[in-house]
Amino acid sequence: MKVVLGVSNRHVHLTKEVFEKLFGENAHLEVRNNLGQPGQFASTSTVDIKVGDNVIEHVRIIGPLRPYNQIEISQTDANYLGVNPPRRQSGDLDGSLPITIIGPVGSVDVESGLILAERHIHMEPKMAHNIGLEDKELVHVYRDGEHLFDAAIKYSDPGSLELHIDTDEANQYNLKTKDILEFDICSK
């Protein structure tokens, strides 16, 4: 089955409370551009993230605001920051790392939320069931018949069929956003 690729650069998801501490009580998250998943967007707002003396500036906030704070970086970013965050699916933040987030009017030390995002394919549950896949099930991903890696199915309702990898993975496999790849079910 074919799937379009979305390469995900470092970004943050914030709660309303943390967003207001960083940008002010009357601040609003504005859309820069819509993303491949329904209702999600890259905002015009960015923050800096900091561990010790190491800072990565201008990290994009992805909207809408969420019920948890999550900071997704690549392994290259982690090496620069001097940390070893766990590789996780979005929202699975148990045991994730702390980090400081800096905005234009304040900063917040979050106790957890820093992760490396696992490769995943967004798929509506109905579609997944129709082809015999479950949430978090691994599938093989191919380019031109060559197996590249495995990725987990991520139920998204509503959702758009889309494979997400980070910038390091895109560079490793010489891939870019909008590339068309294929996937199939791993042998059980």
Image (cartoon, rainbow, N blue to C red):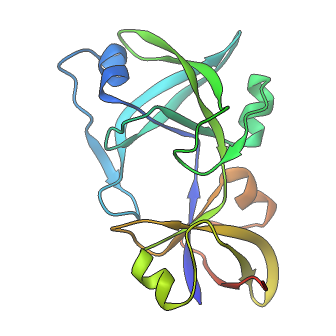
Specify the quadrant of the image occupied by residue 27. Answer: top left
Q: Is residue 39 above or below residue 56?
A: below
Q: Quadrant of the C terminus?
A: bottom right
Q: Is residue 120 above or below residue 148?
A: above
Residue at x 68%, y 68% (from the top left corner): 151
Comparing 132 with 52, the one in front is 132
Residue 83's x, y, as percent? 77, 26
Residue 182's x, y, as percent? 65, 85
Q: Is residue 31 left or right of residue 86?
A: left
Total marks placed: 0
Comparing 18 with 46, the one in front is 18
Specify the quadrant of the image occupied by residue 31. Answer: top left
Residue at x 31%, y 44% (from the top left corner): 64
Q: Is residue 75 above or below residue 147?
A: above
Q: Is residue 1 left or right of residue 144?
A: left
Residue at x 58%, y 47% (from the top left corner): 9
Q: Is residue 166 left or right of residue 35?
A: right
Residue 30's x, y, as percent? 25, 39
Q: Quadrant of the N terminus?
A: bottom right
Q: Is residue 123 above or below residue 69?
A: below
Residue 56's x, y, as percent? 62, 25
Q: Is residue 17 left or right of residue 25?
A: right
Residue at x 62%, y 35% (from the top left corner): 94
